[in-house]
Image (tube, rainbow, N blue to C red):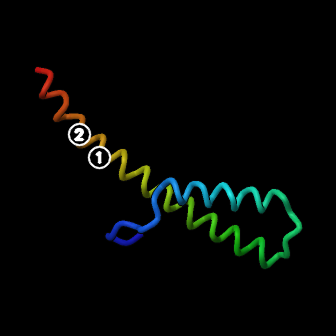
Amino acid sequence: MSDTEPTTTYEQAREELADVVRRLEAGGLTLEESLALWERGEELAKLCQHWLDRARERLAAAAPADDADRS
């Protein structure tokens, strides 16, 4: 993942990933179609993980400030 923020939101990536899973589970695809969907699913999973990691970082950065405000 590059240093720039992706243009796809977490919600968009999650929804597309769910669609990829539905299509793979439904079957009826050629091997090439299945592989292409699997690869796209891997990309989307990494993108979702990126957004979750960023959210954790932001929460961790905000937590000490919240504790100081309560003192």
Residues under numbered marks 2 and 1 in contact, where contact means CB atoms less than 8 Å apart:
yes
Q: Residue at x 72, y 57 (%)?
A: 21
Query: Residue 29 has which mark?
Result: none
Horizontal and vertical percent position of residue 59? 30, 41
Q: Quadrant of residue 18?
A: bottom right
Q: Quadrant of the N terminus?
A: bottom left
Rounded to the nearest angstrom, the CA distance separating label 2 from label 1 is: 6 Å
Q: Tell me if residue 22 comes above or below residue 37 in the rendering.
A: above
Horizontal and vertical percent position of residue 34? 77, 71
Q: Residue at x 74, y 73 (%)?
A: 35
Q: Quadrant of residue 15?
A: bottom right
Horizontal and vertical percent position of residue 20? 69, 62
- Crowd around label 2: few <14 · some 14–19 · many ≥20 (10 Å): few
SS of the residue under disc 1? helix
- Crowd around label 1: few <14 · some 14–19 · many ≥20 (10 Å): few
Q: Tell me if residue 28 comes above or below residue 58 in the rendering.
A: below
Q: Quadrant of residue 2?
A: bottom left
Q: Which residue is mark 2?
A: 62
Horizontal and vertical percent position of residue 65? 16, 35
**Which residue is the extreme one toward the bottom?**
32
33 and 8: which is toward the camera = 8
**Which residue is the extreme one toward the right?**
28
Q: Amino acid at mark 2?
A: Ala
Q: Residue at x 23, y 39 (%)?
A: 62
Q: Residue at x 10, y 20 (%)?
A: 71
Query: Residue 58 has which mark?
Result: 1
37 on left or right of 56: right
